[in-house]
Amino acid sequence: MVGKEHSKLLRDIRKYSEQLAEAKIGLGDFFEESSYLDANNQSRPCFMVTKKGCEFIAHKLTGQKGTEFTARYINRFHKMEQQQEKTNPVEIPVGEVASYLKAMDRIAVRQNLAPYKIAANFKKVSEQFGIQLSEDFVNVPEYNQMNLSDFVDGERE
């Protein structure tokens, strides 16, 4: 879409990353270093580019290339957003969400998961289905009860 060789785009993104780091601006908002397997099954570097990252790249391009990329990028993200709307979790019946939460609760209790962790999981799932819970729904204790096994196994919360 950018009209650059992949290696040149990688070079530019690395340069942008250095500049963002110098400015103490979070890189993760724009780019995430990653890799992919090429046709020969060899690992190659790449970057996962967020919507903000695409905007960043678009603003760095000028002239005809900049105009074309910006238009393509806008169309691509609108198409992606439309696809996400089609699989909106709100369309799942409330009864199925309730059944899922009950099953999740049984598993969490069986595994002796701390109550605040169970509440945090409930909050995450609820919000995915458009159910907004109050900020204080998850009450994280100031101190956690520790067991001897926490030290023997080497696993500590």
Image (spheres, rainbow, N blue to C red):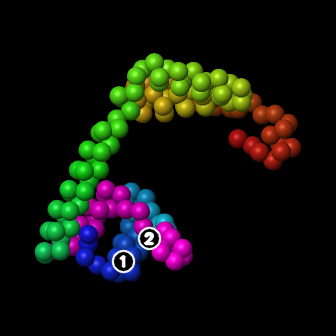
Residue 157, horizontal then vertical, whole percent: 70, 41
The reply to whether the C-beta atoms of the residues labelled 2 and 1 are less than 8 Å apart is yes
Q: Residue at 41%, 62% (x, y): give it.
A: 48
Q: Which mark is residue 6?
A: 1
Residue 106 versus residue 25 in the image, above or below: above
Residue linked to disc 2? 46
Q: Residue at 42%, 20% (x, y): give it.
A: 94
Residue 151 left/right relative to 112:
right
Residue 56 within the magenta-colored segment of the rendering: yes
Report the span colored magenta: 36-62
Residue type for callout 2: Cys
| Viewer-closest of 148 and 57 | 57
Residue 66 left/right relative to 5:
left
Q: Secondary structure under badge 1?
A: helix
Mark 2 vs 1, N-terminal side: 1
Q: Is residue 15 visible to us here? A: no
Q: Quadrant of the N terminus?
A: bottom left
Residue 72 within the magenta-colored segment of the rendering: no
